[in-house]
Image (tube, rainbow, N blue to C red):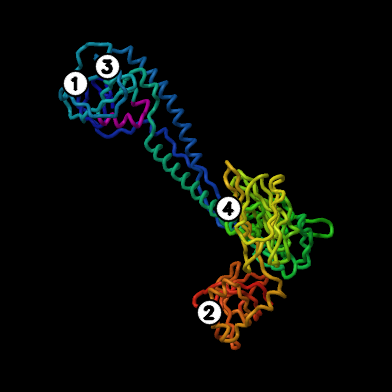
Amino acid sequence: MRCPNCNQWNRANLPRCFHCGTEFRQHESVTPSWRAQLKEGKAKEYIRVDEDGDISVSPDDREVLAAEMAELKARKAAGQQLQERLRTEAESRTAAPVVHVNMPEEPPKEEEPFPMAEEGITRTEDASASEPVQAVPDVASPPLRRSRNPRGTRVVLASSQWEDSRAYDPVVDAMQQNNVFQTPPNLKELGPLPSRRMSHRKLIRLITLFLVIGVVGLVGLLGFTVYQSQKEKEREKNRALVTASIVNDQAAHTILIPGEDGQQIFISNEEIRASYPVVGGFATIEIADHVWYENIENITEESMSVTLLPYVKTASRQKPLEPITYDIVIPLSPIQLVTPEQLRTEVTTAMYSMLFNVRPDSRVTINGVDVSDTVNERGELTYNATVQPIGDNVYHVSVRSPYCRDNTMTVTLFREVQEIPLDLSATTYTSTSNKVIPIDCTTIPGAEIEILSPFTDLKITDLDTTGEFSFNAVFDHIGYNTISITASYPGKKTSRVDYTIYYVPSPDDYTIKAWPLNRDAEYNELLNNIEARSAKSTVYLGVGTIAYLVSDEKPQLAVMYCSDDGTTRPVLLENQTKTTWKVGEYYKIYCDAYGVYNGMPWLIARYTY
């Protein structure tokens, strides 16, 4: 309110004038005139009717917010005009002296209490004046606070005036400026302070907006998850079933493709190209695994992934179905090395017979040469290797069996480097039924030769000129016999050749010499004189069933009871025949003495009937 004495503005709740001390007659609180200008507008409302006919009414908060923002903008413009007018009028009148003090610039700080230098004194500082501070009567004033604008000018306000200034009003600001408080020019550039009520409203709206977005996103995610689950179930229902199976004793896979009864499912792969009817809701397709790789050369992978391309055949077109992919395992072609027993073997002969066991109808190559025609119906392959006196002689064996992938093996025959060449003829037998066979050899002319194994009829007439000589090898026992020859020459290292030949008389000559083992006299005599019978390779006949196998690897070792009742007179038989024995089968076996095994005679079988 305005003082009637000094015409200065004062707070409405003061008992007397803040400037001259005149007592006020009316202490009622005065309502600012500008509040009457505020309008309480009613926001627009939206009426919504749902599918059930229920009506819901909701206000449009955006309309209210837009009206308040327009009104605030108008008030701000009016306040600025009023400030300019009042400032001009105040400059024309004599105002109370104001002290201005220069303050160094410093960054804005938070509000803090401003202590009074002297109780009952209000001070305003400015940099442009050094006049004394005007004192006012000591009244019951609330504690003062200080505020800084961005340029460092300090304005001192009472706490109640400070609170009023936060709810900014241009009229009140102009009234205070006209009296005690000096507002710097730059303060009006900051504009009105934001309303606390408006900030709370915006915060609530933002929170509500975030909640709505979150709920909508959660509902959308839940719906998408349900949709994907239903789609996956439908896909599983229409997906083909693939299971492992056997077709013609070969690994295969059975594929069940869903469809409608009566439809035709066509497989377009070049390996198959066939149609299959749908019966009972599925088209059943059985495909052997070897169909996918049997025409691929030099395949070495353990497995491969194959893809089936099915179509539904209709009268006018073919509708493609989803491709079916599954994995198959490719078995390895079997190969077994019988002779020699090791992959690396030291030999002393120019010829060496290697024996392999493979699957019949296999394709076999040794060092790139196809030798498949030498594989017999039992899958045995005999290869006579020429061994040079150069150290390692390497032989690469490759096997491709039906419905299998390639398998390889490397065999190394080591023959010591010879200073004196010494070789047997390439036509020398590896096995024979003759007790005496001719042997032809060559060495360097003038070498001295020596035969260490039994022989007859040595011929050396051409030894000094061509290095050729010959003799007859004599086999003194049944089985493997080794022919040993050495050649020496002055100033050179002696060379030696050892060549093994398997000797078994013909069946007519061998079987007539057999002694029966089903009588106690012959059985006991063999067991008591086993060393003498082994040295002479005495032939025996065992008749009975194979009781059990000691070893199923080649050569087989089996136990047979030679008594008539099949319970006594056991013998161990080593299978050197061409027949593979089976437990429980009845055989007539001709064999010769070899030694003792676990208290029973050990015999080498030569012929099986």
- The Cα atoms of the two marked residues, 4 and 3, are separated by 109 Å
Q: Which residue is mark 4?
A: 346
Q: Amino acid at mark 3?
A: Met
The structure residue drawn at horizontal position 82% and vertical position 56%, both measured from the top left corner, is: 317
The structure residue drawn at horizontal position 39% and vertical position 32%, both measured from the top left corner, is: 194
Q: Secondary structure at mark 2?
A: helix
Q: Residue furthest right?
A: 316
Q: Secondary structure at mark 1?
A: loop
Residue contact at pointers 3 and 1, CB within 8 angstroms = no
- The Cα atoms of the two marked residues, 1 and 4, are separated by 128 Å
Residue contact at pointers 1 and 4, CB within 8 angstroms = no
Q: Earlier in the sequence, mark 4 or mark 3?
A: 3
Q: Earlier in the sequence, mark 1 or mark 2?
A: 1
- The Cα atoms of the two marked residues, 4 and 2, are separated by 36 Å
The residue segment tinted magenta is: 159-172
Vertical arrangement, residue 259 with respect to residue 568, above or below: above
Q: Amino acid at mark 1?
A: Val
Q: Is residue 95 magenta?
A: no
- The Cα atoms of the two marked residues, 3 and 1, are separated by 24 Å
Q: Amino acid at mark 2?
A: Leu
Q: Nearer the viewer, residue 344 or 44?
A: 344
The structure residue drawn at horizontal position 47% and vertical position 37%, both measured from the top left corner, is: 65
Residue contact at pointers 4 and 3, CB within 8 angstroms = no
Residue contact at pointers 4 and 2, CB within 8 angstroms = no
- Residue 527 image label: 2
- Label 2 crowd (10 A; few <14 / some 14-19 / many >=20): some
- Label 4 crowd (10 A; few <14 / some 14-19 / many >=20): some
- Residue 136 image label: 1
SS assignment for the magenta stretch, majority: helix
